[in-house]
Amino acid sequence: MISAKPDPRPRTASTSHPAPPIGRATRGPLHMIGNAHIDAVWLWPWQEGFQEARATFRAALDRIAEYPDFVFTCDSIGYLAWIEEHDPELFDALREQVHAGRFEIVGGWWVEPDCNIPGGEGFVRHALYSQRFLADRFGRMASVGCNVDPFGQNAVIPQLLSKSGMESYAFMRPQPHEAELPGPTFWWRAADGSRVLTYRIPHEYCSPAGHLGTHVGKALAQLPHTTEPLMCFYGVGNHGGGPTRANIDSIVELNGSDQFPRMIFSTVGAFFDDARDGDLPEYTGEIQPHGVGCYSAHSGIKKLIRTTEHALAAAEKWAAIAGEVAAMPPVTGEFETAWRQVLLNHFHDTAAGTALPSAYDDARDQLGEARSIAARLQNRAIQSISRQIAVAPEEGMAPLAVFNPHPWPVATTVEVEFGAQLGRGAIVAVDDADRRVSVQAARSSTVCGGRRVLVVPVELPPLGYRLYRLYADPVSGPVAERGTVLENEHLRAEIDPETGWLSSLVHKASGVDLIDGEAARAAHAAVLDDPTDTWGHSVVSYRDVIGRFTPTSVRVVESGPVRHVVRVDSAYGSSTMREDYVLVAGARHLEVRVTVDWHERLRMLKLRFPTALTGVTATHAIPYGHLERVPDGHETVSHTWVDVSGETPAGPAGLSVLNDAKYGGDVSDGDIGVTVLRSPPYAWHTPEPLPEDGDFEAMDQGVQRFTYRLLPHDGDWRAAGTPRAAAELDQLPIALLESFHDGPLPQRRSFADASDAGNVVITVVKRAEDGDGHIVRGYETDGAAATATVHLPFLRRTVIAEFDPHEIKTLFVPDDRRLPVVETDLLERPLSESEDRAEDTILDRTE
């Protein structure tokens, strides 16, 4: 069955307060916010959204000219950038009204993004590029965050806002019948202690084109009877439009009546200034849910967003390093161009998977441009560095340079497409210390040219490279066949040859088998009935299992000194799935590479991992953080990992499931469910009926690929280093077949090392936007204070930084080594001495 909230009310309705006595004395002033919610993409393409923005802003200027008290509010900076590029005259007119106080700019982000799917750094870039745009064009930045339409609010938002110059936040979803809050106006606190003054918009962010009496009445029905200030949004929206003459005239009319509170043509900023001194409650945590189907709708866009964000972050690191060691010119402008495409596609209807089909063709092209920029700049940087490595000529040797994008050591494998330049026999790798490393050959993705894939185990220095020399290996011998058991020194995994499902996963150090074998036989690849709309409105959990994938083949496809691979092919209905279980020698995780060819409609696919744990704590990754949730089977959203930790007869243990592109899922006691895909119609919103003839285009049809890793551990996820392990899946090493040449660089080098504090993940090393230094950003992962020593040999600096629990910290490293390293906000502005111990938390040494 599908568990749903027993609430028959329409989507925009909410709990009403008892009718108050008529009279203004019972209500505080009502700040009326004239706005036009513009969906850049939804039931129309972005080109139409572009036109909406232009027409809406022109209409706003007309209303400003006609009504001396009217004020218009805009909350998406990307739309202003569109206008600047397309219609400079209109942009100048808007700027004039901004300075006159008649056109308010809030939001401080490029668009209203989905507030669950983007990565932590994605949210940072919304503020970084938007606030810099505002400062440059308008001489001011937004002080109020505003996301009226996104489908839920992650728990890190207060920290992201407060470190981006925004002290307040307005939102609407989830609404009162979906999530209880202490009041419409409250202080919202993040886990690090940051807080912003927050307001949940009542009823709706937009209104009909006519008289506002009913609209305001419905808004007041959701608001408490208080003399404190309140706020109501109005104006035709979604497809733009904005306040009409009838809207504005009706406010004037209603304001002359004792039936309504005193109404003020106002701004969001003025409301928060008015409300700030009140005795307000405080709330800590996420504000969820609304539309849990959004967490898994349209797998393709979610993977594109994830991979593009990480491609840009990795490319920025190598470009920064190449600028210092190989004289690569700065390319911050090109990175901003690419990031702007990512930010546009964070838009909530795009990222949530709730737009029309053609929107995703456009998104593929836009994100493809960003990925192409990232690939080109990373290649330029990597090649610039690699050609500086001294590689002496040697007969019968092929040099392989491998680059690690993480500022901690990484032991893994790389896969290299290889020809017959060393013959067709076995290959061995030799590292810079002349140690032999076994290499395993695997099948190439092509059947032509005598190609094969070399699987090379590598041990890489932090944010650096290592050179391996490849030779033909005449002494390699046969490897024993191991069947459907995968085993190394850390793990032992069994694939049931009858079901094709993982029946055992033993963590050898503790002796604990994490998988509940009996439950696994009935679970794993479960197909569920899913008749709900694209958003999954009113759904709490998905539980109606109607079938399972059944195996058609279980076989060993690789067995060698480097890794063992068991392939399971299975089928359900018209769909097939291939799972390659991969265990690498020395690895602490079991990797599963999945290819699904899906052809079902109004169905859902979940992969289940039932554990034998009791007393479970469920922990979920969120953007730049983590959050514990009750393991009650409700559909929730997780980022790069989810973990269950609990008790076994042998002691505390747990299982982390890492992913490269999946967000939706559930945890029911010790059973983890990963929602792989859903196939509702595109942009179907109940109560709209489906076509009677059943002719609609369903989502997620065809082939998709993703990878997950199972990381068993003793203790909890902190001991396993789960956040770093997840980062290693999202940003893989880069392998480059090299040639012979002289150079000043050795065969192994680290450019940045922040490996000493295991609970700090450095995510960003890049050129500063102002071009006078570098930015280093990281976050504390475990909820415990940390001292992180960040060695930056490519800049000849070492920085020791104190991280508070859950803190996102940004450091500016000036080019002039006579100047100190300083802490900045997310906009790269140095913190003043009065803010957050700016100098007390940084120690700087020049090397």
Image (cartoon, helix red, strand yellow):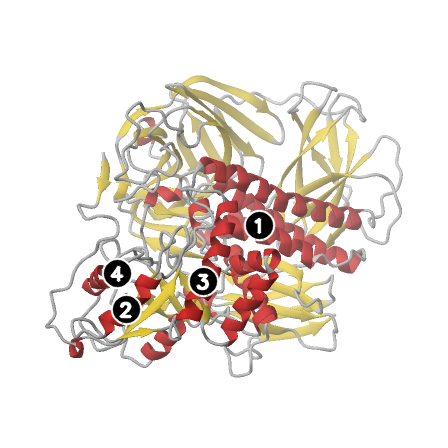
Closest to the observer, 733 or 163: 163
Q: Amino acid at mark 1?
A: Gln
Q: Amino acid at mark 3?
A: Asp
Taking the spot 50% from the left edge, 23% from the top edge, the residue there is: 567
The residues tagged by marks 4 and 3 sit, at their Cα atoms, a distance apart of: 24 Å
Give the label, 2 or 1, closer to the camera.
Answer: 2
Disc 4: which residue:
211
Taking the spot 65% from the left edge, 65% from the top edge, the residue there is: 769
The residues tagged by marks 3 and 1 sit, at their Cα atoms, a distance apart of: 18 Å
Q: Amino acid at mark 4?
A: His
Mark 4 vs 3, N-terminal side: 3
Closest to the observer, 726 or 466: 726
Disc 3: which residue:
75
Disc 2: which residue:
251
Mark 4 vs 2, N-terminal side: 4
**Quarter of image, res 741:** top right
Taking the spot 68% from the left edge, 51% from the top edge, the residue there is: 461
The quadrant of the rendering that contains the C terminus is bottom right
Dot 4 surroundings within 10 Å: few (below 14), some, or many (20 or more)? some
Q: Identify the residue at the far top of this view.
A: 552
**Quarter of image, res 762:** bottom right
Disc 1: which residue:
341
The residues tagged by marks 4 and 2 sit, at their Cα atoms, a distance apart of: 8 Å
Taking the spot 57% from the left edge, 34% from the top edge, the residue there is: 584
